[in-house]
Image (tube, grey):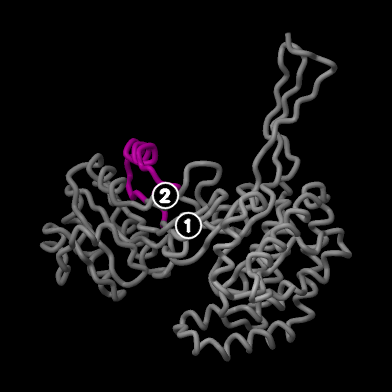
Amino acid sequence: MTAPTTDIPAYCRAVAQRAQAASRKLAVTTGAAKIAWLQKSAALLRSETAKILTANEQDLAAAPGYGLTPAAIDRLKLTPARVEEIASGLEQVASLPDPVGAVISSTVRPNGLRIDKVRAPLGVVFFIYESRPNVTADAAAICVKGGNAVILRGGKEAIHSSQAIVALLAQVASECGIPTDAVQLVSTTDRAAVGEFLKLGELIDVAIPRGGESLIRRVTAEATMPVIKHFDGNCHVYLDESADAEVAEAIVINSKCHRLGVCNAAESLVVHRAAAERLLPKIGAALQKQGIEIRGDQHVCQLVRDAQPASEADYRTEYLGPIISAVVVDTLEAAIEHINRYSSKHTEAIVTSDLASAERFAAEIDSAAVMINASTRFNDGGEFGLGAEIGISTDKFHARGPCGIEELTTYKYVVHGTGQIRR
C-alpha cells in the first residue's frame, strides 16, 4: 500500500488495523506453518538474489545524498554473501523452539483446578530501526516465529532493499498459511508517520526502537504502548585485586576494541587500587597501541603515560569511539558503587580470581548482564544462544538483556476445571 501523503494518520491506522487482524490469526497459526514460511522465504531470497541486489544498488546510489559515512554505507551494502547470511538467518530462526503455547508452569489446587501458565504472543510489534537491510528480515522472522505481526519502519536509506525483501516474504506467506499482513513495511519515509503509529496504543501492543538515543527517547516520550528499549551502553570492566594480568588485558582489549561503535563495547575501566600498579601500565599501553585515548583520575594519569585527566562527564559517556574512561578505587564496594552510579544498566564485567568477589559483584550490580571473567561483547542474542535478536533491553519489567523470541511473548493463565464454583 502506498502512503497517501495528504493523510498520514489514516494510512498509519489502516496499517495497524491490518496488523492487529493478522496477529489474531498468527496466534493460532501452527509452528509447522511458521517453519515452512521461514524455510521457503530463505530459498526464495537465494533464488532472487539478483533482484535484491538491484534494489540495494538504488539505495547505495542515494546514500551519499543522505550524508552516510563510509562505515554506514558498508552496513547498507548487500552482496551475494550477505544475502546468503540473511537467508541462513531465517533458517536459524526456523530451527528454534516455538514458544507459543508452551506451558511455563502448572499446578493443581486443592479444589481440583489445574492452573497452567502458558506462553502467548504479544500481538502487534512496531519496530523502528536503522538502515540495515538484514535487520528487516531478522525482525520479520523473529516476530512471526513468536506469533506476532510486525510493522517495520526502517530508515529511508534502505527503503528499496527493505521493500524487495518484504515483498519476497509476502510472496511465500499465503501459500504457507501465514497472513500476508503479518509483515508490513511502512511505505512512507515521512517522519510524521512514527508519531502517528505511536498514538495507536489500542492497536499496537509494543514499540521497539533501535537506533540513536534521540530516537529512542522520542519513542519513549510519545508512545501510548509499552516500549522495549535501551538508551545507551556505558559498559564497564572492573579489574579486581586478584585479577590475572593476561586475562585482564585480553578482556579489556576485546571489550573495548573488538568493535568500537556497538552498545556492548566497554566505555569505562575500573581498577582496584591493590592491582593498579600491577595491571594499569601494561593494559594502558595495550589500549593506546590500539589507538584508544585514556581519560582517567589522578592515579590513572600517574600510572599510564599520556593518559588525560577525566571529567565527571567522561564517566557518564558512551563514546562509541576510541576513548575510554578509567578510575582507580579502593575496594570492591567502591567499584560497585561507581559502576551503579554511572552505568546505563547494560553490561558490566568483573575480572577476578576470587569467587566471593565475583558473586558479590553479580548480586549487587544493577545491570541487564554481568560478565564474570568474560568480555562485555558477549551480551548478544546469538552469543547467548537465543538465535535472532530484535534488540537489548535495560528495563526490568518483562524483557531484560538480549530480546529473542521468548521476549516477544507474554503469558496467560489457562484454568482447567470440572465444574468448580467459588464459595
Q: Residue at x 59, y 67 (%)?
A: 193
x, y percentage for residue 29?
A: 82, 51
Q: Looking at this view, is 155 or 334 the one in front?
A: 155
Q: State the residue in front, 260 or 137.
A: 137
Q: Quadrant of residue 250?
A: bottom left
Is residue 294 positioned above or below 270 on the image? below
**Which residue bears the numbered disc 1?**
378
The tag earlier along the polypeptide, 2 or 1, is 2
Instruction: State the SS at label 2.
Output: strand
Contact (CB < 8 A) between labels 2 and 1?
yes
Q: Is residue 170 left or right of residue 188?
A: right
Residue 323 lies in magenta, yes or no? Answer: no
Is residue 167 visible in this depiction of the protein?
yes
Q: Is residue 70 visible?
A: no
Quarter placement of the N terminus: bottom right
Q: Quadrant of residue 119?
A: top right
The mark found on residue 207 in the picture is none
Q: Which residues are magenta?
A: 349-375
Residue 188 position by quadrant = bottom right
- The residue at 77%/15% (across/down) is 112
Spatial CA span between label 2 and label 1: 8 Å
Residue that numbered label 2 is attached to: 371
Residue positioned most to the front? 6
| Residue 358 is a magenta residue | yes
Q: What is the secondary structure assignment of the residue under circle 1?
A: helix
Image location of residue 80, percent across then percent down: 67, 82
> What percent of the width, then of the height, locates residue 362?
39, 41
Say which residue appears at 38% left-offset and 37% top-offset. 363
Within 10 Å of the Cα at label 1, are there few (<14), some (14-19), or many (20+) other Cα atoms? some
